[in-house]
Amino acid sequence: MDLLGFIIILVKVLVVFAATMITVMGMIYAERRVSAFMQGRLGPNRVGPKGLLQPIADGIKFFMKEDLIPSGADKPIFILAPAILLIPALMTFAVIPFGSSITIFGREIALQVADVNVGILYILALTSIGVYGIVLAGWSSNSKYSLLGGLRSSAQLISYELAMGLAVVSIILLAGSLRLNDIIADQQGYFLSWNVFKQPLAFIIFLVAVYAETNRLPFDLTEAEQELVGGYHTEYSSLKFAMFFLAEYANMITAAALTVTLFFGGWDVPLLDESSLGLLGAILSVLSFILKMAFFLFLFIWVRWTFPRFRYDQLMRLGWKVLLPLALVNIFLTGGYLTLTAMK
Amino acid sequence: MFTSIFFYFLASIAIASAIFVVLNRNAVYSAIALVLCFFSLAVIYLLLEAYVIAVLEVFIYAGAIMVLFLFVIMLLNLGLEDAFPYFRHLQRALSLFMVGLFFVGIFLIMFNEQGILHQPGEKFSAGDIYALGEALFSKYLLPFEVASLLLLVALIGTVYLAKRKI
Amino acid sequence: MATIIKSYEPTFWDKLYFPALLKGLMVTIKHFFRQKVTIQYPDERHIPPDGYRGLHRLNKYPDERIKCVACEMCAAACPSNCISIIPGPSPWDDGKERYPVRFDINLLRCIYCGFCEMACPEGAIELTEIYDFSNYSRDDLVIDKDGLLGVYELTKKQNYYTKKSHSPASLPFKTERT
C-alpha cells in the first residue's frame, strides 16, 4: 500500500468517526428537543443558541461526575463492559458507503471506509458482539436490576437478530451479493427500484427488529425505568455511563444508515445519474444519504415518544411467532419469484 | 514477513486464551476468554483471506452461541468452581489421553502431508461466498443435510425435554 | 342496573396494527408543530385572568384620601388572621372619622381567599393579579400601609403584567437580600 492510499484511508476513518460523534451529539440534542416539542414543551434552549451546546454541557457534566464502582462488582469486567459495547458500535459504520465516489489527485476514492465483500454479515456480526457489553455490564454490577436488564437484553437481541437477518436475506437474494455497494447498485434508478417497494414486508420486519436491536422504545425492556431503575447501566456513572449512552446512539446511527442502505437505495438520488455529474454528483449523493438517514433518526425519536413499551412476553411472541415466520415466508416468496424469473 | 509475525501473535493470543478458559476457575471469565479465542481465530481466517468464515465465526460462535453460554452461566450464578471430587483421577487420565490423541493427529498431518496447514484453499481464498454455497450444495450435500438433520433432532429433543405436555 | 359492555372483536385491519401505529405517529407529529405551552418565566410572564387573587392593595380616592376607614371588618372576616390594623382619627375633614394608622398584612399567613375584599364596606382593600412577590426574609413579607398603597399606585392605571414578554416594574417594598 502506498503512502497516499494510507493517508486517504486515515482521513476517511477520521471523517467518519468525527461525523458519527457529531451526529451522536446532534441526536442527544434532538432527542430532548423533539420529545419536548411532542409534549408541548420547549426543551433545553438555554445553553448556546437554541440550546445547541446542550450536549457539550452534558458531556462536561459526565466528565465531572464521580466514577463509582459498586463494592460487590466484578471490577475488571465492570470496567471492560462499556468498552465492549462501544467499540463494535463505532466499528460498524466502517463498511457503510455514504456516497458515490470522488476523484482527487487523479485517483478515484470511494466514499466508504472499507469495501468488505461480506459487508452485511460484518455488520450483523458486530451488532451481535455488542450484546456482550450489555450482558457483562449487567452481571458485573452485582445488582439485581442490572442483571435482569442484561438478561432481558441478551434474550431480546438474540431473538430479534434472527428476524432481522432473515429479512436481510431476501435483500441479499435480490442483489445477489453481500457487498453493500452491490446492494446499492441494485437499487439505482427510479424510486420504484428501491428495496422498500420491492420488499415491503422485509422492510417492516427489518424496521421492527432494528428498534429491538437498538433497545429503543417500544422495545426498551432492558432499561425499563419503571421496573428496572436503569437496566444494565443502573450502577454506572460518569464516563462509563457516557460510553453506554454513546454506544446506544452510535448504534442508532448505524441502524438508520443500514436501513437507508438496504431499503432506500443508500446514497442514491432518485432519477439522477450521479457518476455523470462528477464532484457535484458525489456531493448530492452524500447529501441524499444524510437526508435519508436524518429521517430515520427522527423516526427513532418520533416512535419513542409515541408508543408504550411492550410487555416481555409480548416482545418474545412478536419476535418468534410473528416476525420470524413472516421473514421465512418472505424468503420463500422472494426465492420462488427469482426462480420463476430465472426459468424464463 | 509481516503476515507471519501477525499470525504468530494471533496464534499465541488464541492459545493463551484457550489455556485461560481451561485453567480459570471463574466460569464467566472462562466464557470471555473463549470469546477472545474465537476472535483471534477469526482474524487468522482473515489472514487466510477467508472472509466469510471469519465473519461467520464471529457472528455465530462469538455472537450467538457464546452469548447463550454466558446467559446460562449467569442464570446459574456459579461461584468459583469446585473441583468435582468423584472421578477425578479417571477424568484426568481420560482428558490427558484425548489431548494426546489430538496432538498425535496434528503431528501426523504436519509431518506426513507437509504444507497443507498453511495453504489457503484456492476455492475459498477470495472469501467467495458463491464457492462456499456451491460446495455446500453440490459436493458436500450429504454431510450438509445430515448435519441439518442432526440439528433438527437436537431441536426436537430440547422441545420435548422442556415441555412435558405437548 | 348492570351495564352491558360489548366486547370488541378486532378485525383483520386492527390486527395488522400498522394502521393504528400510523395514527399514533400522526398524533405526536401534530403536537410537534403545535404551539408550545411553556412560559419561560423570568423572560416571559403568565398573565393571570381577571379575578385572579394575588397581592393586596389599599385603594385611595382621587383626592389621595385612603378609602379605608379602619373598621376592621376585613380583619374580622380574615380566616387566617393575617390583617392587623391600628386605627386612628382621620386627618381629613370629610365626615369619615377613622383611618388606619397602621395596616399590616402578613403575606405568609394570607391564604388569598378574598374574604377581606368582600367584607370591606368601602371597597378599600382589593386583591391584585400580582403573583410573583417572593422575598428573602419572612419579615419583608409582612407589608405595611405604604407598601399596600404603593401596590395601588402600581396597578391603578393598568394591569401589572402588560405583555407576556414585558418585564414588569419592581414592587414597592423591599425585595433584595440583606
Image: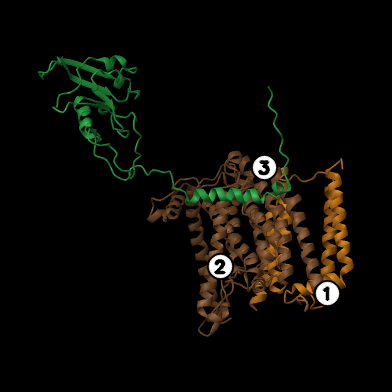
Residues at badges 3 and 1 in contact (C-beta under 8 Å)? no
Mark 1, residues whose alpha carbon is within 10 Å: few (<14), some, or many (≥20)?
Answer: few
Instruction: Identify the amino acid type marked 3.
Output: Arg
Name the mark nearer the viewer: 3 or 1: 1
User: Left or right: C29 with respect to B86?
Assistant: left
Local SS, label 2? helix
User: Left or right: A230 with respect to A173?
Assistant: left
Residue at image x 56%, y 43%?
A: A70
Residue at image x 88%, y 54%?
A: B153
Instruction: Identify the amino acid type marked 2.
Output: Phe
Q: Who's green, chain-wise?
A: C
Q: Position of residue A9 (x, y in %)?
A: 55, 74
Residue A124 location, quadrant: bottom right
Local SS, label 1? helix
Q: Position of residue A50 (x, y in %)?
A: 40, 54
Which circle's residue, 2 or 3, is located before the other in the chain? 2
* Residue extending farthest bottom: A106
Give the residue number, with chain letter if any, for mark 3: A311
Residue at image x 59%, y 42%?
A: A72
Q: Colour of chain A?
A: brown
Q: Looking at the image, can residue A312 be seen?
A: yes
Q: How is the image coloured?
A: by chain
